Amino acid sequence: MYHLYEEQWIDQPIAKVWDFFSQGENLLKITPEHMKMSVLEKPEAKMYPGMIIRYQVSPLLGIPLNWTSEITAVEEESYFVDTMLEGPFKLWHHQHRFKEQNGGTLIIDDLHYKLPLEPLSKLGHSILVKRQLNNMFKHRQLVLKDLLK
């Protein structure tokens, strides 16, 4: 099991930050363009436990992969959890937490994931996956500064 933990402070009230994150299609705005992410079925409502979101993403060599997530837990303006039901990982459990801090909002990403084909995937993780995930979160942090002004 691998773990990635990131924090980002945004100079905006928690209600504005929560509103942005609670709309599944906004994931497209914070994902690097080279990943060619698209929403296959746009959610009709605000996020709720049990919501299913289907994407297509091309994280490697432009090969499109389906990714289906379930929102397994939601507490308004506090946290939500998305879990991958179908996609390139053996396990993906991503908790997004939001805390009021210093007049703004602290965004906390706590991600646990497993790769398929263990133990062979250990090499792939160190060479590619870890770097790609870190770059994705760095990109997201830069984009969020502009989107949530």
Image (tube, rainbow, N blue to C red):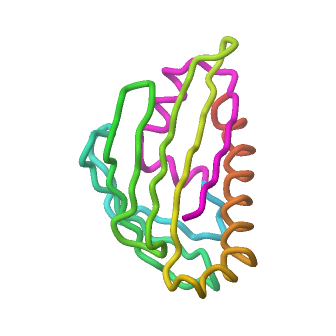
Which is more toward the observer, 9 or 114? 114
The x, y position of residue 81, in whole percent, is 41, 44
Give the quarter of the image for residue 104: top right
Q: Is residue 33 left or right of residue 68?
A: right
Give percent across and percent down for residue 40: 36, 66
Residue 5 covered by magenta stretch: yes
Q: Is residue 21 magenta?
A: yes
Q: Quadrant of residue 119?
A: bottom right
Question: In the image, what residue occupies the spot 48% across and 72% down?
Answer: 89
- Compared to 125, does 5 lie above or below? above
Question: Residue 131 placed where, x, y %?
Answer: 74, 67
Q: What is the count of numbered marks?
A: 0
Which sits in the foreground, 39 or 70?
70
- Report the front residue among 78 and 23: 78
Residue at 39 percent of width and 56 percent of height: 83
Residue reaching furthest to the top: 103
- Where is 88 relative to 41, above or below? below
Q: Which residue is situated farthest in the left direction here?
A: 50
Viewport quadrant of the N terminus = bottom right
Above or below for 130 versus 140: below
For the point 48% across and 75% down, the residue is 88
Residue at x 31%, y 61% (from the top left corner): 41
Q: Which residues are magenta?
A: 1-30
